[in-house]
Amino acid sequence: MHILKIIHGYPPNYNAGSEVYSESVCNELSKQHRVSVFTREENLYARDFTIRKESRRPNLDIYIVNNPQGKDGYRHEQMDSAFESLLSELKPDIAYIGHLNHLSMGLVEVLYQHRIPIVYMLHDFWLMCPRGQFLTRSIGRDCNFTVCNRQEDARCAQLCYGVYFSGYPEDGEHDNERWAAWVKRRMNHIRDLVSKVDLFIAPAKFLMNRYIQDFKIPQDKMLYLDYGFPTDYLDKALLSPTPREVFTFGYIGTHIPAKGVNLLLEAFATLPEPVALRIYGRPNGQSTQALKKIASQLPKHLKVEFCGEYSNDQLIPLVFNQVDGIVVPSIWAENSPLVIHEAQACCIPVITADYGGMAEYVAHHENGLLFRHRDSVSLAEQMLWAMQHPEEFKRLGHRGYLYNEDGLVPNIEQHCVSLIDVFENVCS
């Protein structure tokens, strides 16, 4: 088959979960199929919406569209036009969409007009929620990042797009009406887009059920399929824990509010015994600096180290061999976090929140520990239990993945076999 993968970012420029998953899938599929990737970059010194090509391995070509200015828009006619020209050249058998944020909803219309079947992997709530995570982006509130339970146009305008209001009280009503109308148009376009997609895949049942119940995607257009993972960098034979003076927790991920790193530091600050925390992930400007400042003010018996990012082949030696457990403290409803699966593949116990897909893949005192979502006191209690019961905590990690008796996470080979079956069914 010739598979066109569409994703809003691709390594090495972008390394969050959906991007890393996309790279793994494309590398594996390209062993037996032709794969073309349509993704973006942000080059302020090049023309908007120009497309350049990179050939990274046999049967795998990356087509990169430049979009440095249009990140808040959802439809770009110039991008759609450039994409249509590319599509006429590539003539793929199927499109596998991962995310359209920072790209254009119009890509779906182009695919539909050219009668290219479309499979859409849902990585978050972006189709249901203009911000993608049902997490508010407020300004001037006690908490600017609160969990939202529904999409309503005026509510979205007030709780998320208020950051674009003029700030003058007399403009408030006009600004709210303007952005509510913008959100309404956006959601109408999204519903039209949904009607043109042949099949949706969700990597967590929590996510799947939310789309079926709250967004009314027909159940027969929805499939549950968890992510698959390359096994080469998850080889348990590479595990050789480094001797440590104190119990050590690890965090892996981006340094943004949605990931809850500050919540983790808040919980960590209350631990009464000597303990260490290693924070991994690409630095994120002033957000990382603010987290480092919080860490610098902790009691002396608490050690925090910011370790930067790493390549996948270094995950075990640089991360898993250096920690006793991984904490996933996200304050939004993560769906199927890659880091949880990676830890389970290597028998590393996980502490995470009792919400969303996080609680779907970690069962309390079965293969990890759960704390009350967004509750630093509850998180601290679970961290302290892990410190005081190190052997029991370690045994939790050996259970691994809940949905295989042997604890093994789904591998990328099996996952891609399933994907090809899905693609062939959709094409037929």
Image (tube, helix red, strand yellow):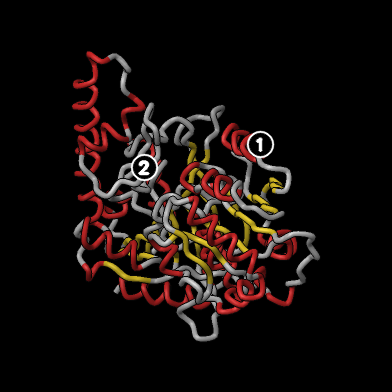
Residue appearing at x 41%, y 51% in the figure:
332
Task: Name the mark nearer the viewer: 2 or 1.
Answer: 1
Dot 2 falls on a residue whose secondary structure is loop
Near mark 1 (Cα within 10 A), the count class, few <14, some 14-19 or many ≥20, is few
Dot 1 falls on a residue whose secondary structure is loop
Dot label at residue 297: 1
The answer to whether 74 is drawn above or below residue 410 in the figure is above
Residue 283 point in image, percent of width and height: 63, 41
- Work out whether residue 254 or residue 192 is closer to the camera in this orientation and state it: 254
Dot label at residue 426: none
Q: Is residue 402 left or right of residue 101?
A: right
Near mark 2 (Cα within 10 A), the count class, few <14, some 14-19 or many ≥20, is some
Q: Is residue 96 left or right of residue 290?
A: left
The answer to whether 378 is drawn above or below residue 228 in the figure is above
- Work out whether residue 272 or residue 54 is closer to the camera in this orientation and state it: 272
Residue appearing at x 47%, y 52% in the figure:
330
Amino acid type, callout 2: Thr
Residue 318 point in image, percent of width and height: 73, 59
The answer to whether 245 is drawn above or below residue 44 in the figure is below
Amino acid type, callout 1: Gln
Work out whether residue 44 can be spotted: yes
Residue appearing at x 50%, y 54% in the figure:
329
Position of the C terminus, as image quadrant, is bottom left
User: Image quarter for residue 177?
Assistant: top left
Residue 335 point in image, percent of width and height: 41, 60
Q: Which residue is mark 2?
A: 146
- Work out whether residue 423 or residue 254 is closer to the camera in this orientation and state it: 254
Work out whether residue 410 can be spotted: no
Residue 419 point in image, percent of width and height: 42, 72
